Amino acid sequence: MAARRVRTPATITAGILLLAATTSTAVAGADVARATGVAAVDDRGVAVVGPAAGRWHLDDYGSPVTEATYLKPVGAVSVQQSIDGEQRPWMFTIIAGQLYAAWSDQDGPQWLPLGAPPKSEIFAPVGVVTVQDNLYAPQRPYVFVQTLDGHLWLNWFNGVDWPWLDLGTPPPTKVADGIGVVSVRNGFGLPQRPYVFVLGVDGHLWLNWWNGGGWQWDDQGTPTDGTLLPYGARVGVVNLRLTPEGADWPQAFLLDNQRQVWRNGWDGGRWTWTNHGTPHGMSMPDSRGLGALAVRDTSEGAAWPHAFVSAYGSVYELSGAGGDWRWVYHSDPVQFEFLNPVGAVTVQDKPSVGDRPYLFVVDRYGGPVWSNWWAGRSWEWVEQAGTDAEMLGYQDSGSAVTIQDTPESPQRPYVFYWSSSWPRKLMVNWWG
């Protein structure tokens, strides 16, 4: 199969990344696109079939190279060029040590080669976020990766091009593993600032963040009575927000060597470590993180963190709704062997209602992507028809993001993953 066309950097006008409207065509076998999930009525009396009225589609983005190897997804984000412009999904991925971006326009799927840092080879992804300087500014992607020499590097869109910036290492140590990235706003209308959490070789959680004038390293320390996993500690990073126009409080979720879930969170005045343990104190030797989300029960409510982990092929949710932390077991439709994360998003069916979480996973040896989603009164499991994802080892198998066509439209999930069939292709399973 021929490689997809590779573009030079996207057209830039007046410092704004221009994203053309996408005309997306489903791949052969589009009849697999269908409404996912069972019909349900949520607690507000809203009829729910999947994210909203529509169906699932499956698109083939191909690959920018003939044989895509050493694949490491970094993450997907929605990019909006103006406050009233259309959102478009962008997927960032590492292929054989090189960073690429994938998106779609009126000509179909496109690829943008972003290269690698000039001083060292990319070793692993850390995460990607978008940053807005103010409410009316364009969203600009910031992509963070770890290099072989233990440095944290940033590739970002500065309004003109995509430079690389070496953020260095935590002062006494090096980066061992990425934990996650989040954009933080201290209040309504204020600039967003990236917060990057990594695990150091010294076993400490470290934070690299933009303080308004430069990049700063902070030592978040270690849990009071636990040792963080040296690799595979990541569960996810999200913001807690008590009011719609309030400040963002970052919350990082990690696993210790006993597979207990720890939270390192900002409470408005200081950083604290909290041990959330395991569900019912059970032993979870094969547990791994599946992601974290901030969920609002109502459109004007607080955004509370929810973290997801797998154990024994099952999903367990650490719910922080209302500040009352508790574990929730998600019953399984089939007996999974070992779940690997593909992505996690919240979906808002209309601006006047709250969020519904969606979790996307794949089993140990790859295969169909499964969605585990909140239908309003219960968690439902559905196999995403036509999907066939590669497992990609002990890392994320893909990423998910939601798109909103207009401020009044429902949010729609886009789920990116690499195919298990050879040659590898980037696929997107999207609702519309």
Image (cartoon, rainbow, N blue to C red):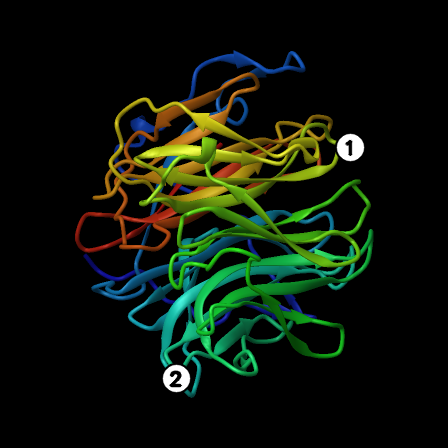
Q: Is residue 227 above or below residue 218?
A: above
Quarter of the figure with the N terminus: bottom left
Amino acid on which disc 2 is placed: Ser
Task: Determine whether the residue tagged by mark 1 lies in a helix, strand or loop.
Answer: loop
Report the Cα–Cα distance between label 1 and label 2: 46 Å
Q: Which residue is found at the position 46% from the left and 39% from the top?
A: 278
Amino acid on which disc 1 is placed: Glu
Q: Which residue is found at the position 74% from the left and 36% from the top?
A: 302
Please give the residue where the numbered disc 2 appears in the rendered image.
Answer: 120
**Structural crowding at the residue carrying mark 1, measured as other residues with C-alpha within 10 Å and reported as few (<14), some (14–19) or many (≥20):** some
Percent position of residue 147, x then y: 41, 77
* Quadrant assignment, res 59: top left
Q: Which residue is found at the position 79% from the left and 57% from the top?
A: 269
Q: Is residue 381 above or below residue 202?
A: above
Q: Is residue 36 visible?
A: no
Percent position of residue 133, x then y: 74, 64
Side of 57 where 392 appears, left or right: left
Along the viewing direction, whichever of 144 and 178 lies nearer the viewer: 178
Percent position of residue 103, x then y: 46, 55
Q: Is residue 79 above or below residue 287?
A: below
Q: Is residue 213 above or below residue 326?
A: below
Task: Determine whether the residue tagged by mark 2 lies in a helix, strand or loop.
Answer: loop
Task: Specify the label residue 300 is tagged with.
Answer: 1
Percent position of residue 189, x then y: 82, 55
Along the viewing direction, whichever of 141 and 152 lies nearer the viewer: 152
**Structural crowding at the residue carrying mark 2, measured as other residues with C-alpha within 10 Å and reported as few (<14), some (14–19) or many (≥20):** some
Q: Is residue 301 visible?
A: yes
Along the viewing direction, whichever of 137 and 132 lies nearer the viewer: 132
Q: What is the tally of numbered marks visible in this picture?
A: 2
